[in-house]
């Protein structure tokens, strides 16, 4: 089974075209940069999300799904690959 067929990515597809892609890219880039100095994905997500609190609160379900995907897959396929899968799914 492909990663893209997992329930998290199925839910993520519901947001296709409904979120600000540039802002999502910026948040994912910040997570990637911060994760280089830390190996704790959960702490990194909380830190970056707190910098974009208004956006995260506005689209809580969407960003919760992204957090779940990042936590589940970043060690398996790398943060860059997970970010690209997320972006390609919502484009």
Image: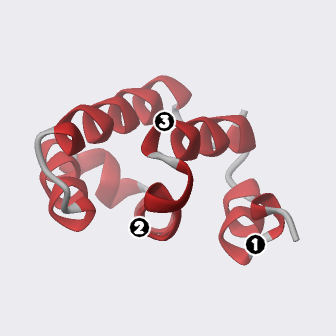
Dot placed on the residue nearer the N-terminal end, 1 or 3? 1
* Cα separation between marks 2 and 1: 14 Å
Q: Quadrant of the N terminus?
A: bottom right
Colouring rule applied to residues? secondary structure
Q: Residues within 10 Å of mark 3 (few under 14, many from 20)?
A: few
Residue in view at x 32 percent, y 46 percent: 55
Q: Quadrant of residue 75?
A: bottom left
Q: Secondary structure at mark 2?
A: helix
**Measuring 73% from the left and 76% from the top, which residue is drawn there?**
7
Task: Say the numbered circle drawn on residue 71.
Answer: 2
Q: Which of the marked residues, 2 or 1, is nearer the chain's N terminus?
A: 1
Q: Is residue 71 above or below residue 17?
A: below
Residue 6 - label: 1
Furthest residue in direction front, as rendered: 76
Which mark identifies residue 80?
3
Quadrant housing residue 27: top left
Around disc 2, counting alpha carbons within 10 Å, would you say few (fewer than 14), some (14 to 19), or many (20 or more)?
some
Q: Name the mark nearer the viewer: 1 or 3.
A: 3
Residue at the farthest right position: 1
Residue ID at (37%, 55%): 58
């Amino acid at each position: 089974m492909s990663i893209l067929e997992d329930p998290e990515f199925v839910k993520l597809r519901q947001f296709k075209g409904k979120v600000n892609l540039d802002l999502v890219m910026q948040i994912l880039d910040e997570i990637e940069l911060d994760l280089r100095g830390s190996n704790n994905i959960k702490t990194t997500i909380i830190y970056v999300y707190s910098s974009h609190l208004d956006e995260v609160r506005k689209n809580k379900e969407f960003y919760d799904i992204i957090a779940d995907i990042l936590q589940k897959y970043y060690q398996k396929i790398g943060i860059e690959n997970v970010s690209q899968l997320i972006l390609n799914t919502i484009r």
